[in-house]
Image (spheres, coloured by chain):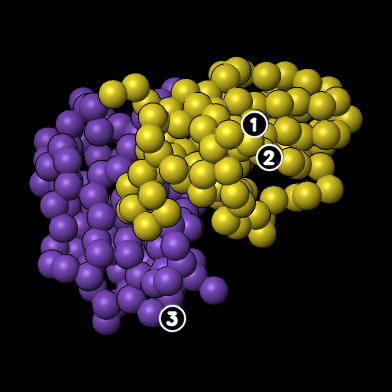
Chain colours: A purple, B yellow
Amino acid sequence: AQSVTQLDSHVSVSEGTPVLLRCNYSSSYSPSLFWYVQHPNKGLQLLLKYTSAATLVKGINGFEAEFKKSETSFHLTKPSAHMSDAAEYFCVVRPLNAGNMLTFGGGTRLMVKP
Amino acid sequence: EAGVAQSPRYKIIEKRQSVAFWCNPISGHATLYWYQQILGQGPKLLIQFQNNGVVDDSQLPKDRFSAERLKGVDSTLKIQPAKLEDSAVYLCASSLELSTYEQYFGPGTRLTVT
């Protein structure tokens, strides 16, 4: 079975400092991986996706993630946090040959302090 | 481009009552998904439609949940009878085709069962 584990349920950073949200996956084959963001009272929005091309993936709003097969990780980073980054972030796996069925991690709530 | 529309946004019912949620996907999107997001967890896929056909409903509790997409456009998800553990946000998403990566999410319907 495919699964994804987000290692931190809450992360707190100060504005202007780096962000690191950790994600590990398990999959029998090379999956596609995604990060989604959910702002309060808004729909989930795709931040970035990895689909077996470049291992370093750049997304919207300055976020990026690196696919590391040896570590089965897909951590999300941003060099400098902004207040507007405060939200819930979900790491998502889509196994090979799974159609478009997504499996979500439990989420990480990012808090940004002024 | 209009996004995925869902109604109602909020619903409070007593256990054993029935409830229905409505979703209108982005125009032209063939694939429609219903997810259940329990507080503090990531969304879980309940059912996936391709046009008016069900692609996967393996995680839908069929003894109480039903969903339809009769004309291949909008969709209705019903719970009858509701249980306390059905309290959650019900998210609808759509994508252009079954194999298209990005799913666009609606704002969700928050259901509270008392």
User: Which residue does the numbered mark 3 point to in the structure image?
Assistant: A28
Q: Which amino acid, by three-letter code, is at mark 1?
A: Thr
- Callout 1: residue from which chain? B
- Give whichever of B46, B75 is nearer the camera: B75
Quadrant in the rendering for residue A112: top left
- Callout 2: residue from which chain? B
SS at circle 2: strand
Q: CA distance from mark 1 to mark 3?
A: 34 Å
Q: Is A24 on the left-hand or right-hand side of A66?
A: right
Q: Residue at x 36, y 44 (%)?
A: B96
Q: Is B80 on the left-hand or right-hand side of B111?
A: right
The spot of residue A47 in percent (x, y) is 25, 44
Figure check: A28 above or below A67? below
Q: CA distance from mark 2 to mark 3?
A: 31 Å
Q: Residue at x 16, y 58 (%)?
A: A57
Q: Are marks 2 and 3 in one subunit?
A: no
Quadrant in the rendering for residue A37: top left
Disc assigned to residue B67? 2
SS at circle 3: loop
